[in-house]
Image: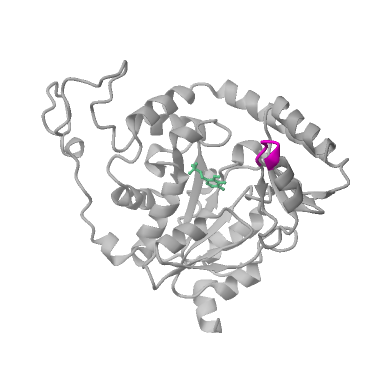
Amino acid sequence: MNEEIKQQYYSGPDGNSPFRRLGGLLRENIKNLTPYSSARDEYQGEASVFLDANENAFGSPLNQQFNRYPDPLQDRLKKRISEIEDVPSANIFIGNGSDEAIDILFRSFCNPGVDNVIIVPPTYGMYQVSANINDVEARKVLLTEDYQLNLEGIAEAIDKNTKLIFICSPNNPTGNSINRADVETLLANFNGLVIVDEAYINFSYQKSWTQELSKFANLVVLQTLSKAWGLAGLRVGMAFASEEIIEVMNKVKPPYNVNEASQRLALEALTNIDQLNSWVRETLQQRDRLVLELNNFDFVLDIYPSEANFILVKTTDANKIYDYLLSKGIIIRNRSKVELCEGCLRITVGTPDENTTLLDELKKL
Ligand SMILES: Cc1ncc(COP(=O)(O)O)c(C=O)c1O
């Protein structure tokens, strides 16, 4: 990358933040987009007869009623998430899983065939897949040997068409958190968006980046109810960002992207923080137990420190162990073909019984 562009787009720790106004980052067609206006968007105020959305006015053939379209902006759910996360509702986007938020960021900011994003493998696979779907180049800058950011490499990879940088912390599949100071360097110097994916933050002692939104206009934090909250089947994920960014994401999303059943059930689940905390505590205990016991096996070469609900285990023969466990009806994730994860298996922490089954079968190997 030539020095002039480097200065312009990645000015180094002492430079002023070169984050250009959001308008300069947005795709032109999105800037000019008139979003779909749903029946419920157009109506404001009190009413008792709803004949505006071609719904079935009689009801649903169920015990619960789902005949009405859901709240397009999920106000009640956002209010609860706002209380839990201490982030104003206006800074929250809710998606059909955080995967939807990832896709919407591509569609809002990246011109297909023109723009590019930076990903830092080994990391969560959907950044690459979303890039491919949207015909956007994903420039790979491998993490270092200790699974941290290669800031030099990222600076080299950035050019004037680089719109997004995806950082996963704690990182999937390695389990470690990414150094805060390094993320801060990116935020302060990159003039596109830095997306920090905190899908596993509940299992970590790290501070969430959600509290830094007022400091960094180019920060987007992703979280999900699919992991610690135990609601993967509901498909509810969040993006936290500036009001400007959230407005764009709301404009681009499908009108009713989070269904009524998911909104109701998520709201109910979010009252039960005690359950979440007790599962997290138990998961961490079980994670310690797995690390301790797995270390006794000769085929285990290394277990990487994890701040998530899974561990990455380096083995002498990942394929053999994977196939053996599969034959016993135990499925783990074979990551041995992933760069920097050679020989590695990713094991999700299960219930005490599940972990016992896993360890018992491994003893027979
Ligand atoms: C890092 C990371 N981000 C996001 C997701 C997807 O979350 P969601 O279920 O909210 O789409 C996953 C799921 O495995 C993940 O590991």
316 sits to left or right of 269: right
Measured from the top left, where is residue 131 in percent x and y? Answer: 45, 62
Depicted 145 relative to depicted 258: above or below: below
Front position in the image: 32 or 212: 32
Q: Nearer the viewer, residue 262 or 47?
A: 262
- Residue drawn where x is 65% and y is 71% of the image: 152
Residue 202 placement, left or right of 272: right
State whether residue 363 is above or below residue 212. Answer: above
Residue 357 x %, y % = 74, 30
* Residue 151 versus residue 167 in the image, above or below: below
Asked whether 284 or 292 is in front, the reply is 292
Which residue occupies 53% across, 48% down?
212
Residue lying at the far top of the rendered structure: 63
Q: Position of residue 99 (x, y in %)?
A: 46, 48
Q: Residue furthest front?
A: 327
Toward which corner of the image does residue 108 lie, by quadrant?
bottom left
Pick the front one: 357 or 67: 357
| Magenta span of residues | 326-331
> Which residue sits at x=36%, y=67%?
24
* Residue 203: % across, % down: 65, 37
Residue depicted at 86% across the width and 42% down the height: 297
Q: Main secondary structure of the magenta part?
A: loop
Say whether residue 329 is magenta.
Answer: yes
